[in-house]
Amino acid sequence: MHHLFSQVLGQRDLSRAGDLFSLEDTEIEHCLSQALDQIKDISCSPDYLTNDNDQAVVEICITRITTAIRETGSIERHSKALVGLWESCLEHNLTPQGENTEDTPHAKIASDITSCILQNYSCPSVMVLAVPLAVRFLQRGNRELSRNMSSYLSLAAIAEADLLAEHTEVITLSVLGGNHMLLRVLPSVYARQPDTIHRHLGNLTRMMSHLETPEKQHLIRLIQMVAEQHPLMLSTQVPVLVSYLSDHSLTEALLGALVDVSQASPSSLINFLPTLRMVGQQSTVFQGSVAKIHGSVGIISETHAHSSLVYLVSLLGTMEHSFHHTLLLEIRALTDRYPSLLGGSSKDIYRMSNSFTTIARLLGRRLEDKTHSRVEEAGPSLQTGRGGGGASEQLLQVNVQSFDKIMGDEGA
């Protein structure tokens, strides 16, 4: 060990500690691990918590050592000793007691070392040692340390997601405990630990209203990934997800996720179609997703298909032409599945004209004809709106009439 380090650490000589900064980094690089081991011995001594001199010596020496490691790029050579000192801090109290908000001596050591270690998040050999310890620090209750760990772990998730995936449970619990910064880690580890996140999906989803906008974007990305890969896991969360549609920063992404859920579990969206139609009225950008959800729900039964068709056909006359192809695909899927809805002649209608307006008018009239036929066949009770779903059929007639009015205005 360099003689000045030996003097400062061996004799706890605070008066000479500042002289360490007069030495060249390359002059002391070879002995940094030894110095770190000696600092660990000092900080673990019984009287360290009450010895201000020793604490000051340790603080200065750690600053000098971490500076030299950064300047010489020698983190891999000294990572074992550095992480060893870092780990020793976990054996001591890290949380301020009572009204005292100042960091404890060992929390200061941990904080000083954290950036030196974790800023090397792209170095696998260092992260193998550091990540398990960083996760343990999350559980120790020191908010400032936890915040710093979270910041670096979020970066580490980009380069070393596999290492973090082993600790998905702890990370998720930390998020649920209020450490929202770690939300950005969850999308990185989801593909490797989906079941762990699925167990907490309900609580995670309900967090949305308590998050800041950047944090919401990380959570919505996780929800999108679940919807794409395991949509059934979100079927029970549909009521909560629909309630967030009023947040305009989330609407488009949430609708996309709900489209995926509707394809896997159409019945989970049945009760929310009126709300979704209102969302669709807010912007044409949203109508494509709302149409797809209606198409998915319509597959459930002929009754649902008829209701969905009335809505989809009405959109043909109001949506931008760029969305017409999407609408016709949904309409075609429903009429192919239930040919009797249009009397078995839907293909003829599609071939009769290249005009979406004309197709919409023909489909609307055919739906209206089928509705009248059903009411007449069912008897007076349905015609008066009593029993057997007559009110629903009458509502469909009103929708078709509204659609025809739109078509009439367009042709005027």
Image (spheres, rainbow, N blue to C red):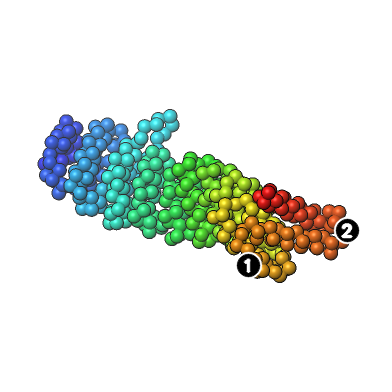
Question: Which percent across, then down, holds residue 82?
Answer: 26, 48
Examine the rendering and report whether any part of residue 226 can be seen.
Answer: yes
Residue found 76% across the figure and 62% down from its top:
370
Residue found 65% across the figure and 59% down from its top:
358
How many residues crowd around disc 1 within 10 Å: few (fewer than 14), some, or many (20 or more)?
A: few
Q: Quadrant of residue 67?
A: top left
Element type where label 1 sits in the image: helix
Question: Which percent across, then down, holds residue 117?
Answer: 29, 47
Residue found 40% across the figure and 30% down from its top:
100
Element type where label 2 sits in the image: helix
Question: Which percent across, then down, holds residue 109?
Answer: 30, 40
Q: Nearer the viewer, residue 239 or 174?
A: 239
Q: From the image, state whether disc 1 or disc 2 is nearer to you.
A: 1
Residue identifier under label 1 = 351
Examine the rendering and report whether any part of residue 296 can be seen.
Answer: no
Amino acid type at image mark 2: Pro
3D distance between C-alphas at marks 1 and 2: 37 Å
Residue found 80% across the figure and 60% down from its top:
372
Q: Quadrant of residue 141?
A: top left
Tell me which label, 1 or 2, sits earlier in the chain.
1
How many residues crowd around disc 2 within 10 Å: few (fewer than 14), some, or many (20 or more)?
A: few
Most extreme residue toward the top is 99
Give the number of the disc on residue 380. 2
Q: Nearer the viewer, residue 169 or 332?
A: 332
Count of numbered circles in the view: 2
